[in-house]
Amino acid sequence: MMPKLKTLYICQQCGAQSIKWVGRCPGCDQWNTLVEEIVEPSASSSGRAPLEAAEPTLLADVALDETVRTRTGLGELDRVLGGGIVPGSVTLVGGEPGIGKSTLLLSMAGALATRAEGREGQPKDGGPGVLYVSGEESMRQTKLRATRLGLSSAAIHLLAHTQLEVIIEGIRQLKPQVVIVDSIQVMETDALQSAAGSVGQVRACAQALVRLVKESRSALFLVGHVTKEGSLAGPKVLEHLVDTVLYFEGEPTSGFRLLRSTKNRFGATYELGVFHMTAEGLVEVSNPSELFLSDRTEPVPGCMVTVSLEGSRPLLVEVQALTSPAGLGLPRRRTTGIDFNRVSMLLAVLERRVGLHQLAQQDVFVSSLGGVRLLEPAADLGIALAIASSLKEKPTSRQDVAIGEVGLTGEIRPVTNVAQRMHEAKRVGFKRCFIAASRHGAASVEGIEIIPVRHVKEAVARALA
């Protein structure tokens, strides 16, 4: 008798399941995200002997072996991963099409293969190196990219296939140290009848690959596509399956690429790696703070520098603001790299608490240079000073930097790791730093003058004096 097929409707955004189709997902409240999945029960699921119970182990009896990380050969990637690749770990790399995900992983494969050949020392556990599984490109296309990157190592094994069973058999025979699957959205398994890229196929293929590498202690890198909303395609369970989630981002018109960690079970989250895309591939940027500052020599109204802490790395980022009379209609507010709601709150504070009532009739445009996203509240004071500088047409000093969170009453609130941020500002060459008055004594750094301020109105008056 043929097994009875079961139809489920699975949300592409959150992975919620329903036995019938509905317009709005019950899990994430998004419209038209449920897709049909036909689930065929396994032939061996019926009549199977009961499994033996696993014996629990005391937590005190679990041995902790020191994890030996494998350096990738790319310092910026090692920083984001937490020091290198952990054996048996699973990393998901997401990004927009054409941003450079394949280039990044192929460069990493070349650096690892060079070590496997013994040019930089034989790895402790040996192994044949790296298996690069390309589901979107042929071997010839991958070879052309490797040649352009200057990689011709025989330690990189290529497999151009989309069938999960074939890939798993190749991994078992080769037993590589690192497996790269590009990409998980094109893989498919015979266990499901749905098309490749569907929610069921993505989840089933990812689970099978994760189970395999956890048993073999190989490190797995999965490439994931990004939807038009900016999230990883497929159900949210894909991010829960892996140990590390990396986002590769950058402006399409800019050559700079940012590698950001949003989840890491083996290191700090929200670490940032900076690369420069060239004709020969990705080049690491060792001093990103100078990269995100403009090259102008004369002071210009509407500019202020702040220090953002990305993981454990302080970055100096220049904020630029432009105000212009709105004329007829409602004034426009536009932001690039900065949260729109945060800027709206700062505009309200500047109007009510500082007395800049002209902002109600001004178009306001705020942007961060270099494609950096300013996510933490420590940039509030720098954004507020840039807007006030543009409105008053008074430039701030080129030697000033501002660090602090702005409250709804206009008070300047302290932020974490002020001394570390100020040391980075001093290294680049800044002379004065505006910080919260409550952290004045705790953030003394030799060589940089501290300007303690308690209210944003005081900060505007002193910065634009």
Image (cartoon, helix red, strand yellow):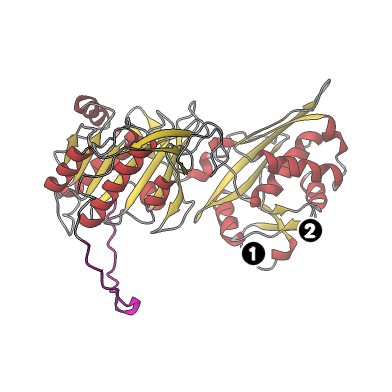
- Alpha carbon of mark 1 to alpha carbon of mark 2: how far? 15 Å
| Kind of residue at disc 2 | Arg
| Mark 2 Cα-neighbour bin, 10 Å: few <14, some 14–19, many ≥20 | some
Circle nearer the viewer, 1 or 2 = 2
Judge left or right: residue 184 versus residue 367.
left
Which secondary structure dominates the residues rendered in magenta?
loop
Check if residue 68 falls in the magenta segment: yes
Where residue 21 sits: x, y (%)?
A: 49, 34
Label 1 CA crowd tier, 10 Å (few <14, some 14–19, many 20+) = some
Query: Residue 3 at what x, y percent from top left?
Result: 25, 40
Please state which of residues 406 and 341 is positioned toward the viewer in this rendering: 341
Label 1–label 2 contact, CB within 8 A: no
What is the number of the mark on residue 443?
1
Q: Secondary structure at mark 1?
A: loop
Quarter the N terminus occupies: top left
Residue at x 22% of width, y 63% of height: 51
Q: Earlier in the sequence, mark 1 or mark 2?
A: 1
Q: Residue 400: x percent and y percent?
A: 68, 48
Q: Look at mark 2 in the image and give the residue it sits on.
A: 454
Q: Is residue 121 left or right of residue 423?
A: left
Please name the amino acid that badge 1 sits on: Ala
Task: Please tell me whether residue 22 belongs to the stretch shown in magenta.
Answer: no
Q: Is residue 442 above or below residue 268?
A: below
Instruction: Please give the range of residues in magenta.
Output: 50-71
Kindly give the residue lying farthest to the left in the view shown.
173
Residue at 32% from the left image edge and 34% from the top image edge: 102
Label 2: which secondary element: loop
Please state which of residues 151 and 59 is positioned toward the viewer in this rendering.
Answer: 59
